[in-house]
Image: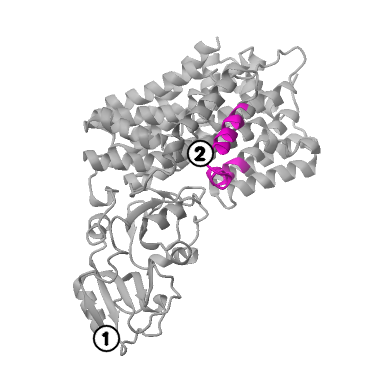
């Protein structure tokens, strides 16, 4: 029976097109796009009004929230820090061995921790290992990020597209044609055999071909070890100069000026700290007033410091005496942070963020790809993936990082927050996995049991749990699920499948599956992998039913292919986060990603067909 295009189908297709366009162009935030879509679906009655917001209470969303909470608990208990020490011991400084162990560690943890959160945890660990062994970080970060994506398909625990898959199958079952068999839901480890093969192939790919494909650029800007205040600036980002103290005299024109006004003066150095009376401040805010006797901690070339001191009638001392405690390298220094795609800092200027007033953090430089911005940094608009050089106390930096608006790349001096809770964290995590595997509990209930256990035993508190949840991901996922339901309920998926079969009806199942997989991975390059999964799974199921194929295999191929985002740095948040610290260019992703994408495509098709034959 040939399906005709109905007004409801046209509406759903319009919503799909609008969603794709907005996610690509980013004219509207992704989470706001999701909310807009779900509201339009409710207003137009495409699905019943009482089900419009069911995505927020769906098993997939609740499971993702619980997994994020447990991932935060594992981090605060020091599980990953212990894993880093194990990597160091196993690698013994040998580059080939170090890469394998890091990639293996990334693959293992990607099965249980969401990929973006894992990348944020692994970048400092990788930088620490790079600093201690001398292996260029550019040869470690990209394989680590790619192995997170190849390993994330090992289970249905931490991969959002795979978690969403069961909710999409429930919707498909409700709209199956007469006589069609119900599609079974996937278990926690239904994909594990194929996922293990994908992870192993990813690790082997970099072991055998990494030296030929990976860049080996070694320059000061790529070294992300913590540095001494007096020397590290020039070594890392070309910020030439030395630290010094300027004492403001009674005759100085600086008296009564604010820090912001002083920084606008011709030849003004970077003002990193100030001491007025008993008040000492690192990264003083722009409206902080300078008085007689104030001591400014500044950074700049010696000649410029001498000239500025003479012009402003200040006493210059190149020895740090009065501000020695603030500039102690065990307490403060330079570090690098990366702006993730979900950061609230994106599209804001440095000045507009008021980082000095809010967090006590001075911004020294910003990198956009290969470009380093040092002049007029405060006017720089931040973008996702930017690397920002900051000066602060380690405590202030750690506290500011808790808001997840930036990821600290540098291995800053810090202690694990709750090392005494490590066994509770591991115990409840294992318990949650056992409940999901050996009982009939839904994944959401099993995962939430582990999360609540960590909260009750003090592995982390509720405020930390809230901060550990990536609410943007939650909103995007919850709001796009009804779009997938709409494609089933209105027959849009079947109509699209009809056109796929019109052009490929005589093709073999391998060609059909390959076409769906390629379309999915292309969509996932320019939009979220959850969005690509939500749009393509209903179509894949309809194609499978129409051709007599296994709907489970077709749906799984689509969900797994959505993680094959190796071609563009913008294809996945984890890739954007390593671009700046690793100094990668677009050609690096293409050179490494194209062969890996083709390899993953072939392995995906073969392994899943064998698994669901």
- Residue ID at (37%, 25%): 202
Looking at the rendered structure, the secondary structure element under dot 2 is: loop
Q: Is residue 283 magenta?
A: no
- Residue ID at (32%, 52%): 370
Decide if residue 511 is in sight here. yes
Q: Position of residue 170 (x, y in %)?
A: 69, 24
Task: Give above or below for 555 relative to 254.
Answer: above
Q: Which mark is residue 313?
A: 1
Q: How is the image coloured?
A: one colour
Decide if residue 525 is in sight here. no
Task: Give above or below for 255 relative to 79.
Answer: below
- The quadrant in which residue 550 appears is top right
Q: Viewer-proximal residue, 418 or 463? A: 418
Q: Position of residue 12 (x, y in %)?
A: 71, 37
Range of the magenta residues?
446-475
349 sits to left or right of 547: left
Q: Viewer-proximal residue, 462 or 135? A: 462
- Residue ID at (24%, 69%): 320
| Screen quadrant of the N terminus | top right
297 sits to left or right of 194: left
Q: Which mark is residue 374?
A: none
Task: Give above or below for 369 relative to 536.
Answer: below
| Screen quadrant of the C terminus | top right
Q: Which residue was labeled with disc 2?
A: 459
Cα gap from disc 2 to disc 1, whole angstroms? 54 Å
Q: Position of residue 355 (x, y in %)?
A: 45, 63
């Amino acid at each position: 029976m040939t399906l005709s295009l109905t007004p409801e189908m046209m509406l759903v297709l319009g919503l799909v097109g609008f969603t794709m366009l907005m996610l690509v162009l980013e004219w509207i935030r992704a989470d706001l796009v999701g909310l807009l879509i779900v509201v339009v679906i409710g207003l137009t009655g495409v699905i019943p009004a009482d089900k419009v917001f069911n995505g927020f209470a769906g098993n997939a969303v609740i499971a993702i929230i619980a997994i994020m909470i447990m991932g935060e608990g594992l981090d605060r208990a020091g599980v990953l820090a212990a894993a880093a020490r194990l990597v160091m011991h196993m690698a013994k400084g040998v580059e080939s061995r170090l890469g394998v162990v890091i990639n293996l560690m990334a693959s293992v943890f990607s099965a249980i921790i969401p990929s973006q959160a894992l990348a944020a945890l692994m970048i400092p660990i990788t930088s620490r290992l790079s600093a201690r062994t001398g292996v260029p970080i550019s040869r470690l970060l990209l394989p680590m990020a790619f192995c997170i994506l190849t390993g994330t398909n090992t289970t249905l625990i931490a991969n959002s597209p795979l978690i969403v898959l069961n909710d999409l199958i429930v919707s498909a079952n409700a709209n199956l044609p007469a006589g069609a068999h119900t599609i079974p839901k996937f278990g926690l480890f239904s994909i594990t055999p194929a996922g293990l093969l994908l992870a192993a192939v990813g690790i082997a790919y970099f072991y055998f071909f990494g030296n030929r494909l990976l860049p080996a650029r070694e320059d000061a800007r790529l070294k992300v070890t913590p540095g001494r205040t007096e020397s590290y600036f020039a070594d890392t980002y070309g910020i030439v100069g030395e630290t010094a103290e300027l004492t403001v005299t009674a005759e100085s024109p600086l008296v009564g000026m604010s820090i912001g006004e002083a920084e606008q003066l011709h030849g003004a150095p970077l003002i990193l700290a100030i001491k007025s009376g008993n008040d000492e401040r690192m990264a003083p805010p722009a409206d902080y007033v300078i008085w007689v006797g104030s001591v400014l901690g500044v950074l700049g070339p010696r000649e410029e410091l001498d000239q500025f001191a003479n012009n402003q009638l200040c006493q210059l001392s190149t020895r740090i005496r009065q501000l020695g405690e603030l500039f102690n390298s065990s307490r403060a220094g330079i570090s690098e942070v990366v702006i993730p795609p979900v950061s609230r800092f994106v599209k804001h200027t440095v000045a507009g963020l008021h980082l000095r007033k809010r967090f006590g953090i001075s911004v020294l430089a910003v990198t956009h790809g290969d470009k380093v911005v040092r002049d007029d940094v405060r006017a720089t608009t931040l973008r996702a993936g930017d690397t920002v050089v900051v000066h602060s106390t380690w405590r202030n930096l750690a506290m500011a990082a808790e808001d997840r608006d930036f990821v600290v790349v540098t291995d800053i001096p810090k202690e694990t927050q709750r090392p005494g809770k490590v066994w509770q964290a591991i115990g409840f995590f294992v318990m949650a996995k056992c409940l999901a595997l050996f009982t009939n509990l839904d994944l959401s209930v099993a995962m939430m049991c582990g999360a609540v256990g960590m909260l009750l035993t003090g592995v982390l508190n509720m405020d930390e749990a809230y901060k550990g949840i990536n609410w943007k991901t939650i909103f995007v996922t919850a709001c796009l699920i009804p779009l997938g339901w709409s494609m089933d309920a209105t027959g849009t998926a079947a109509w699209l499948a009809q056109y796929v079969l019109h052009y490929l009806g005589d093709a073999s199942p391998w060609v059909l599956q390959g076409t769906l997989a390629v379309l999915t991975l292309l969509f996932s390059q320019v939009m979220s992998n959850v969005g690509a999964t939500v749009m393509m799974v209903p179509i894949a199921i309809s194609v499978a039913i129409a051709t007599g194929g296994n709907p489970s295999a077709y749906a799984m191929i689509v969900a797994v292919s959505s993680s094959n985002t190796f071609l563009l740095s913008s294809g996945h948040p984890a890739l954007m986060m390593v671009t700046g610290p690793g100094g990668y260019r677009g050609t690096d992703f293409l050179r490494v990603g194209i062969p890996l994408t083709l390899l993953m495509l072939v392995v995906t098709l073969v392994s899943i067909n064998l698994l669901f034959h």
